[in-house]
Image (cartoon, helix red, strand yellow):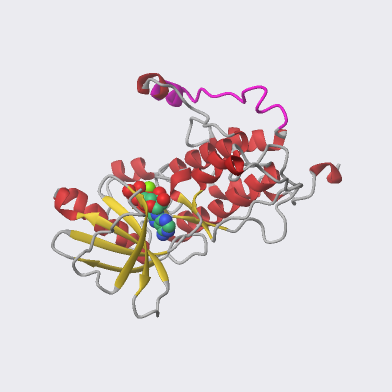
Amino acid sequence: NESKGKLPRYPGLERWHLIEKMGDGAFSNVYRARDLDGTAGEVAIKVVRKFEMNSQQRANILKEVQIMRQLDHPNIVKLVDFSESRQYYYIILELAPGGELFHQIVRLTYFSEDLSRHVITQVADALEYLHETCGVVHRDIKLENLLFSPIPVIPTKHPKPKAPEDEDKVDEGEFIKGVGAGGIGKIKIADFGLSKVVWDNQTMTPCGTVGYTAPEIVKDERYSKSVDMWALGCVLYTLLCGFPPFYDESIQVLTEKVARGQYTFLSPWWDDISKPAQDLVSHLLTVDPAKRYTIKQFLAHPWIKGTEEPTYAAL
Ligand code: ADP
Ligand code: MG
């Protein structure tokens, strides 16, 4: 565990005191850090190893920063600052101290429908902002890139005393109906490393600028927002049952399953999950991108709009 060990010192990062390592990727380490003069509080710093990257990869980092600069939404990690040294890029980010949604699913096995709705609605609000307001496609929506802020408190019905080794486990069936006052905290979308500004679906104009775009670009990008909607479907499916819609040990078989949209609401895990929830998932995991739900359709779906009260109240 590197967080316990000595943390590296980076040239040009003297303003920040690194506290612990929070995550890593192919070319980067992410640290929790504190402003030494105490004005900015705690942040996350993504230190990218520039020296290991080719010029295309470096350009992608600059694009990631450029896109993040324009974003301002409560469910999107904010860019605080950006700087670089000869060997590194430093992306200073708003800290999401609660860690990855991925870890909460691993910890809890799966989420109740209310909890799932509480989480996915926040992701969808951010996607609506990205797609409709900014013309940005994220292209890497997944449990590892959805972060909690602050550390989530998952409400349980009967908190039972637990053996020390089970301290961080929550038994299934312990969930209360609803998500409790204040829910379980905010979800923030992180990692704009694959994100892209795209052409608007309706007007076929680029977001922000006007240009002379070739037909093949317009055609290519017509459905690009729908990749986020597919991913949103994968996240929602996984939240509800605890395993992903598509899986196979062989990459080749997995690719084939995805291409065909071959997934099932596997029994017994899906037996008690409501029909409206299944209906919504199926409108996202639709192979034809023209038929797949847009973010607007997603937000208008009865399962999303339904209150946190049981739906039988409306019948
Ligand atoms: P990569 O492109 O390598 O996946 P990410 O931006 O996703 O890089 O960061 C890697 C990991 O670091 C994330 O999955 C998350 O665990 C952690 N992380 C990233 N940004 C933050 C943040 N703002 N607050 C807390 N943790 C973060
Ligand atoms: Mg990531």
Residue at image position (36%, 44%) is: 221
Residue 191 at what x, y percent from top left? 38, 52
Q: Is residue 269 magenta?
A: yes
Depth order, front residue of 130/153: 153
Dividing the picture into quadrants, the one containing residue 186 is: bottom right
What residue do we see at 23% from left, 63% from top? 9
Is residue 223 found left or right of 54 in the rendered image?
right
Which residue occupies the foreground of this view, 313 or 32?
Answer: 32
* Residue displayed at 57% across by 50% down: 296
As drawn, 215 above or below 184: above
11 relative to 126, above or below: below
Return the residue nearer the eye: 209 or 144: 144
Marks counted in the figure total 0
Q: Nearer the viewer, residue 191 or 105?
A: 105
Residue 81: x and y in percent read 32, 70
| Residue 194 in sight from this viewpoint | no
Q: Quadrant of the C terminus?
A: top right
Residue 22 visible? The answer is: yes
Picture coordinates of residue 54, whole percent (x, y) = 15, 48
The residue segment tinted magenta is 255-272
What predominant SS class does the magenta segment belong to? loop
Q: Is residue 22 magenta?
A: no
Which percent across, then down, holds residue 228? 46, 44
Q: Residue furthest front?
A: 164
| Residue depicted at x 73% and y 45% | 160
In the figure, residue 109 lies in which quadrant? top right
Horizontal side, residue 213 vs residue 186: left or right? left
Q: Is residue 278 above or below residue 51?
A: above
